[in-house]
Image (cartoon, coloured by chain):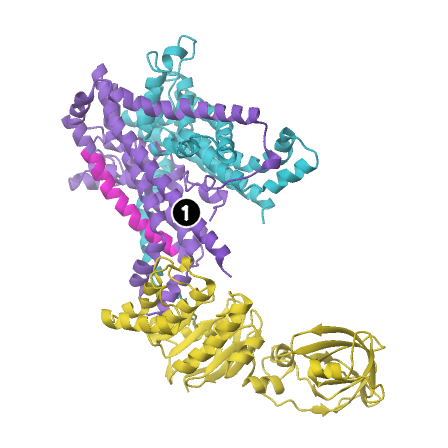
Chain colours: A yellow, B cyan, C purple
Amino acid sequence: MSIELKNVSKRFGEVAAVHNVSFSVNDGELMALLGPSGGGKTTVLRMIAGLEMPTTGDVFIRGQRVNDLSVQQRNIGFVFQNYALFKNMSVFKNIAFGLKIKKWKRADVASRIAELLKLFGLEGLENRYPHQLSGGQRQRVAIARALAPKPSVLLLDEPFGAVDAKIRQELREWLVTLHHDLNVTTIFVTHDQEEALEVANRIVIFSRGLLEQVGTPREVYDQPANEFVARFIGAMNVLEPEVRGGVARLGELEFPAHGQADGQKLRIGFRPYNVQISSDLTQYRYHAVLRHTFFLGVLLRVELELPSGLTVRARMTKEEYAHQALEDGKEVSFQIRQYRVLVKEMADLPPESEIGYQAPPTLGENI
Amino acid sequence: MAQKRFRVLPGFGLTMGFTLFYLSAIVLIPFAGLIIRTLELSWADFWRLATTARALAAYRLTFGASLVAAVANAIFGSLLAWVLVRYEFPGRRFVDAMVDFPFALPTAVAGLTLANLFAANGWLGQYLVPMGINGAFTPLGVVIALTFVGLPFTVRTLQPVLANLECEVEEAAATLGAGRLRTFLSVIAPSLLPAVLTGFALAFARAIGEYGSIVFISGNLPFKTEIAPYLIVMRLEEYDYTGAIAMAVVLLVFSFLLLGAINLIERWSSRFQN
Amino acid sequence: MVEPVSKLIMSGAVSINHGAGLKRSQRATEESPVVKWTLITLALGFCFVFLLLPLLNVFAQALSHGWTWYWSSLAQPDSWSAIRLTLLVAALSVPLNVVFGLAAAWAIAKFEFRGKLLLITLIDLPFSVSPVVAGLMFVVLFGAQGFFGKWLDAHDVKIIFAVPGIVLATVFITFPFVARELIPVMQATGTEQEQAALTLGANGWQTFWYVTLPSVKWGLIYGIILCNARAMGEFGAVSVVSGHIAGQTETMPLRVEALYQGATEASAAAAFALASLLALLALVTLGIKTFLEWRQARMERLIVGRVFDEH
């Protein structure tokens, strides 16, 4: 285990930015800290780096408790959101800074820099200054600078936030390749769930200072621990039917009561791709009008409006869409292939309740 | 567990400690000394020393001339700032740089050259004195010197505000039919007012404390052209320490009041900014 | 990096003028040429009378007896020792205030603490004090009847009417200059670059030397030349504490006064000769300031241009 956090909390005055977080990072892993703004993920990252001190709890790097180690002593590489390049130094000097501090020999510095420039595609730029570089170039200089002294762990704070969408995509792919080649334990903070899903080996999801779930991209997508994760990762239809006469109802939709009594409400979530649509009005149970089609490239997103006014979002491939001869305004039938009953998120639970990652208790099918 | 305040960047203790030490040694202790000596005076003594007839004449000249100079600076400084920001003309860069000249020039030199300029045989005096405008050894001379000294304050305070004015606002007024003068009076001038006031107050404050240039140009005649700081020095030379301290405190109090007023103006003017 | 009005003020410290670099195209909102040129003429006239003439007059009067006389009057023993004393005072007081300025700016700009506003206000205090009052404060402390007067006398240490007093008074007057220039610059650069240096293993001194100092280079230079100009030109405070002992405690401004008070026309011209050196110093100060502003405007244009190039 490369990095471990045990019951780490961080208070800023009255506000608890991070509350009782525990997780571990494996050697060589590429891990994402994911969550909405203010969720505490950057604070956690900075505590690992030593740029913040936990109020309570312990941080371990390679088995050693590092709470009392200063940031200089932790041998970590940190990439700031706005790069924090040294504006008065050339690219060469920027990248060489950590080596100079560690008193590397001139020749070693030169060869290490040459190696990094090649690896990062920055050849020829070593004498430029930060203000003469593009955003993507600055980003790579920042990462090269952090990696030059061969740290045991690489920490990135929203590395792709400040860059254009197209470049962001390229940088993502490049980061995965880089990580694969260098095999340094890497943790990055992001609020973009697509990015986390695409890039990371495992994801830690934060919300309002609490840890909601830890898992592989597949795990958090297919088996979200609670409603927050379910809605944050991927798109989700969320309904709140009320139990009447032993059946949970909302509009025309009916779900099993799942043990709830009359008058109680259920939180039901289902992914858009789990909505099956047919132009044959007899094929499926529910009817709706296809209100709007959104073209997403490979997929199409479709909005269904039920007679009661309820809106359901569905997704399908182009082929499916064409096969069913769908179009705006057409009446269709649909069913929900798979849904789950959603557990409330950690952030709403009182602090004393047990914090564990319960597998979602009920999975309903084909209603 | 009570936590020691964690600061990521090092050096807070060292720099803060040195800063406070140096501040105390150079600024606070001398101030304290003055205040202690002042408190040793009885209120009656203080009042008597601070308000002798000669002192009152000195205050009148100091505050009066400073006020006139500050008004002159407000007017001409605003004019200068406007012209520098809005117009292009040959030598603009040079004039812009020269605005700081009174600030960079030692006050003694300023006084020396102004006194010489306006004396009866000086470059300007030779024309002005026959006209009755006597710039040397008169209260007018004091005003001239104070105007010189305070000029950068009004110009430099107004320039950035002028530069930041949105020209869209003026264009909007134009599209609504307002002529230039109307636009200036209704749209531009009100937004410049706080900066002009601040510059005025700064020039005023600067003028009150001015000593070096006046010494050369005023002739320092008691009751006629003697400013308050000069009287303080006179009293010191006569070993009238308490007298000097009393007047010094009067000037100090007034300076602080002015400082407070400037702060208020700033606060008032920034309520319209985001 | 246009500073709000409040930052320019409080001190009277003139700071980098941002208005000069901006060009405004206002086709729809221009005054008639008549108005425009009248205003320009008025402004220029005012400048000429109040700024240019006094400057030229100094040099004209100084050279009124010719070059040889000019140099020889500067070499007069009392004038020459005044020049030396002024340089000494500046050489002592400016570095002290630079060290203070750096320390204070570091503490204020890079950390959060209670009472920061109070500290900044206290640092500005010398600006709001008349120089004569400042000198008086030191007389109250160290004069013969001052708080430390007896003790100093007993140990035969002279502060008032001697060089140490002049240095002290000068340090007081120029106290805020460097700090006032550095604080906004250090605040503007933030703490991220320093934090990055820490993550790369640098300790406090290395971070300060390699990262912070270079980033405040121009602000520091500007603060130094302002501090120096004021230190060399200070009159009021030094006049009170120095005792005007010719050849010993007369700085250049005091010597100018002494010469001016002299009875002869020659001594008045000698006053101008010495004053011309100070005026030259003022011009050099202005020149460096203009250069620094030009440089900053150029850097800003480069960066803005770069932003538009990115894609």
Q: Which residues are magenta?
A: C84-107
Please indicate, yes or no, whether residue B4 appears anywhere in the rendered image. Answer: no
- Residue B219 horizontal side relative to residue A365, left or right: left
Give x and y (percent) for residue B260.
49, 40
Main SS of residues in magenta: helix
Please count the marks in the image: 1
Q: Give whichever of B203, A254 is nearer the camera.
A: A254
- Residue C248 horizontal side relative to residue A335, left or right: left
Q: Give whichever of B223, A319 is nearer the camera.
A: A319
Please indicate, yes or no, whether residue B95 appears anywhere in the rendered image. Answer: yes
When asked about the image quadrant of residue B96, the answer is top left
Q: Give the letter of the chain under mark 1.
A: C
| Number of other residues with Cα within 10 Å of mark 1, as a class: few under 14, some 14 to 19, many 20 or more | few
Give x and y (percent) for residue A253.
81, 84
State which quarter of the image contains the C terminus of chain A: bottom right
When asked about the image quadrant of residue A145, the answer is bottom left
Three-letter amino acid code at the position of disc 1: Arg
- Residue C109 horizontal side relative to residue B174, left or right: left
Residue at 15%, 39% in the rendered image:
C156
Q: Give whichever of B48, B34 is nearer the camera.
A: B34
Position above or below: B252 against A150: above
Residue at 48%, 37% in the rendered image:
B157
When asked about the image quadrant of residue C111, the answer is bottom left
Q: Which residue is label 1 attached to?
A: C298
Residue at 31%, 51% in the rendered image:
B21
Position above or below: C284 against C263: below
Give x and y (percent) for residue B14.
31, 59
Assess whether residue C311 is covered by the magenta stretch. no
Q: Give whichever of A194, B37 is nearer the camera.
A: A194
